[in-house]
Image (spheres, coloured by chain):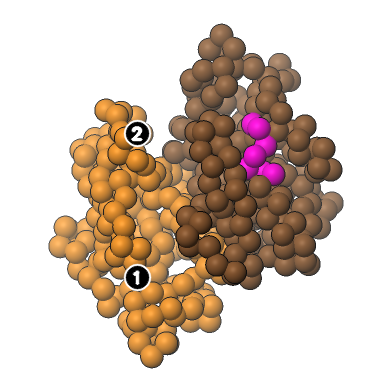
Chain colours: A brown, B orange
Amino acid sequence: MRTLQNRVKEDGVVIDEKILKVDSFLNHQIDAKLMYEVGQAIVDHFKEKKITKVLTIEASGIAPAIMASLHLDVPCLFAKKAKPSTMTNEFYHTDIHSFTKNTTSTVVISKQFLDEDDHVLIIDDFLANGEASLGLHRLVQSANATTTGVGIVIEKSFQPGREKLQSEGLDVLSLCQVASLAGNKVKLVDE
Amino acid sequence: MRTLQNRVKEDGVVIDEKILKVDSFLNHQIDAKLMYEVGQAIVDHFKEKKITKVLTIEASGIAPAIMASLHLDVPCLFAKKAKPSTMTNEFYHTDIHSFTKNTTSTVVISKQFLDEDDHVLIIDDFLANGEASLGLHRLVQSANATTTGVGIVIEKSFQPGREKLQSEGLDVLSLCQVASLAGNKVKLVDE
C-alpha cells in the first residue's frame, strides 16, 4: 500500500536495528484517513473469504481494526490486557510475550463474543516475532472459531513473525513490509 | 442520539447502581458503524468551532475518537497509561483516578504532538466523575493549547462529571445521558 509505505519511510523513526517508532500516525497520534484506507486495503485482500468478526488487541490495534470492521460491517472485538487475578471462567485467556518491552501480558476476551460459528480476521499494527497475532489466534482456537486470516499494518520482515504465522496455515497480509532498519534507515521489501 | 440511546437501553448491563457495562458495542466488542455515527454526531455539535486535534485516552476512547477524527480530517491523539518510571521530559503527564477501578494511573502524551496552536476536542467513552476528561484537559493546558470542547458517548448524569467540566468553562456534549441505574434498570435523562 503505497501511501502507507511512503508514510513509514517519511515519518518512521528508527530507534535501533529492531525498533521502528511510528508515533506520528499509528501508535500515539493516529492518521484516521490513512487508517480508513488501511482498513479498506485489508478488507479488499480478504473479500472472497467469510468474516464474521475482526479481532485485535488494545491499544494500537484498535484504529486499523475498527476501520476494517466498518468496511466489513461486522463487529470489532479487542482483547484486553488483564491481571491474572481478574480472570474468571467467563474469559478465554492467553499469555503474550513482548520482545520489545521484555514483558509478558495475559490477554483476555469474553467468551460471550466469540463462538464456533465465528470466522475471524485478526488485525494488528505490527508483526515482528508474531507473538501478539499468535496469541490472538490461540484465543480464536479456544473458542473453536476459525481464523480467516491476519491483516498487519507494518511487518518487520527481518523478524520471524510471518514465518511462524504461515507455519500455522494462516493467510498473512502485511501492507508495509520493512526489510531492514540497519544504518538508521528504513528499507522496505519492495524498493 | 437515538440509535445510541436505544442500544444502551437494550444492550447495557447494569452491574450495580453506579456501573453500566456496554461491552457488546463499546468497551470490548465495538460496533464500528455505530461509532462512525457517534463520531459524526459529535462533529456536528462542534462544527462551528475550530478543531485541530482530537484527544482521547486508551483504550475504549479510541473508537469514537478516531471516527470523529475521520469526519474532521484532523489527527487523533491518544494519551497512554504509563509507569512513572518511563517518564521523561518529552512528555506531558498527569494522574487520573478511576473511582470504578479504585486505581490512579499516570497518563502521558508526547510533547511533540500538542502545542499552543492546537484547538483540541476531547472525546471519551464515559463521563462519570469527570476524572479522565479533566485529566485530558490538564494535558491540553500543559501544552498551552485550547480545549474546544468535550464529546462523550455515555454520561452518567447522576455523577458529578458534567458539573466539574462545566465549572472549568468547557462545552460538554454527551450523546446518551443516563439518569439512573437504580433497580437494575437503565433510565435515560430524556425519557
Q: Can the viewer see residue B171 in this picture?
A: no
- Front residue of B51/B7: it is B7
Answer above or below: position of B113 versus B170. above
* Residue A166, percent from left and from top: 80, 37
Residue B58: x percent and y percent? Answer: 43, 50
Residue A78 picture quarter: bottom right
Say whether residue B76 is magenta. Answer: no
Name the element at disc 2: helix
Q: Residue at x 42, y 75 (%)?
A: B20
Determine the residue positioned at 19% across, 64% down: B164
Q: Nearer the viewer, residue A116 or A40?
A: A116
The residue segment tinted magenta is A128-134
Q: Which residue is mark 1?
A: B155
Tag 2: residue type? Thr
Q: Residue at x 38, y 50 (%)?
A: B56
Report in which chain the residue with disc 2 lies.
B
Furthest residue toward left: B167
Q: Are marks 2 and 1 in contact (CB under 8 Å)?
A: no
Residue type for callout 1:
Glu
Q: Is residue A52 above or below residue B7?
A: above
- Percent x, y for residue B3? 51, 75
Residue closer to the observer: B58 or B114: B58
Residue A30 appears in the rendering: yes
Image quarter (top left, top right, bottom left or bottom right) of the C terminus of chain A: top right
Residues behind callouts 2 and 1 on a single chain: yes
Q: Position of residue A101 (x, y in %)?
A: 50, 33
Observer-side mark, 2 or 1, equals 2
Image-based side of A97 in relation to B142, left or right: right
* Numbered label attached to residue B86: 2
